[in-house]
Amino acid sequence: MLTATIYENLSLLKDLDQKQLIVLIDPDKFDEFKAEEFFNNLPEDITYIFVGGSTVEAYKTDRTVSAIKLFSELPVIIFPGDHTQITEKADGILFLSLLSGRNPEYLIEQQVKSIYKLKKSNLEIIPTGYILIDGGKECAVQRISKTKPMPQNNIEAIVNTALAGQFSGKQLIYLEAGSGAINHVSLEIINEVKKALSIPLIVGGGIKNSRQLENIYKAGADIVVIGTAFEKGNFH
């Protein structure tokens, strides 16, 4: 039985070992007029929809969420690149802190800037530790945040960063290789982080096919996010 909040549902499914698949929609790449076709082509096992991007045109997030709501009953969660992407039309928001970088703008400043909107909204706010992992190419998050991703071979540092997020009160840890990454987060990293955490683990970036998806689940990811492969319609 599903419980009251998005986070309670995520945690319940984790405890039941039911893997979750989320589609990430970038408003700047989403054609609102083809929304029905887009959702008709998605796998049936999608559990949530993330909406956001590193940079998004003004009001595009709002229009994108409105279009999604016309054709999907799935809960919509904002995955914000900055505080301007918040819309009350969504159901929840990942309250992100970029733990892999040391730029205060994305550790706390953007969060402070978002409070004016959030305290007036009914969005469910989910504190999330966001860890950028080197996916083999420079990604938009790296350029915008002016931070470097963590090397995939530095597993101990990645695990410690994830645990620091959990110990500081984050409810989710998100390992991200970046949009369109050449390489997804390694299975060894996922496995080691999973063993260390007691909160749900999200993995995204560079996942191109169902074989990779299944291997990432087996390595320990509770939730997998796929964006670019669904946007291009070439996930198989």
Image (spheres, rainbow, N blue to C red):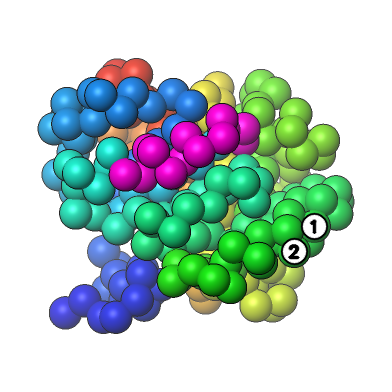
Separation (CA) of disc 1 from disc 2: 5 Å
Task: Tell me where residue 161 sits by quadrant.
Answer: bottom right
Residue 53 in the image: above or below residue 167: above
Number of marks present in the image shown: 2
The amino acid type found where label 2 is placed reads Val
For mark 1, give the secondary structure: helix
Residue 221: x and y, percent? 43, 55
Q: Find the magenta span and give its range.
A: 54-66
Query: Who's the residue at 56% across and 35% down the image?
Result: 58
Magenta span contains residue 134: no
Q: Which residue is mark 2?
A: 112
| Residue 57 is one of the magenta-drawn residues | yes
Q: Considering depth in this image, is 220 or 82 the residue closer to the camera?
A: 82
Residue 195 horizontal side relative to residue 29, left or right: right
Whether residue 96 sits left or right of residue 2 in the image: it is right
Say above or below: 13 vs 58.
Answer: below
Residue at x-position 66% and y-position 60%: 114
- Residue at horizontal 37 percent and vertical 62 percent from the top: 91
Quadrant of the rendered structure where residue 66 is?
top left
In the rendered view, tell whether residue 64 sits above or below residue 200.
Answer: above
Dividing the image into 4 quarters, which one contains the C terminus?
A: top left
Determine which residue is flagged by label 1: 109
- Percent position of residue 174, x then y: 56, 54
Q: Amino acid at mark 1?
A: Glu
- Residue 40, x across and y down, in percent: 13, 32
Q: Secondary structure at mark 2?
A: helix
Vertical placement of residue 28 versus 66, above or below = above
In what quadrant of the picture does the N terminus appear? bottom left
Residue 189 in view, yes or no: no
Cβ–Cβ below 8 Å for labels 1 and 2?
yes
Is 92 in front, or is 164?
92
Res. 88 mark: none
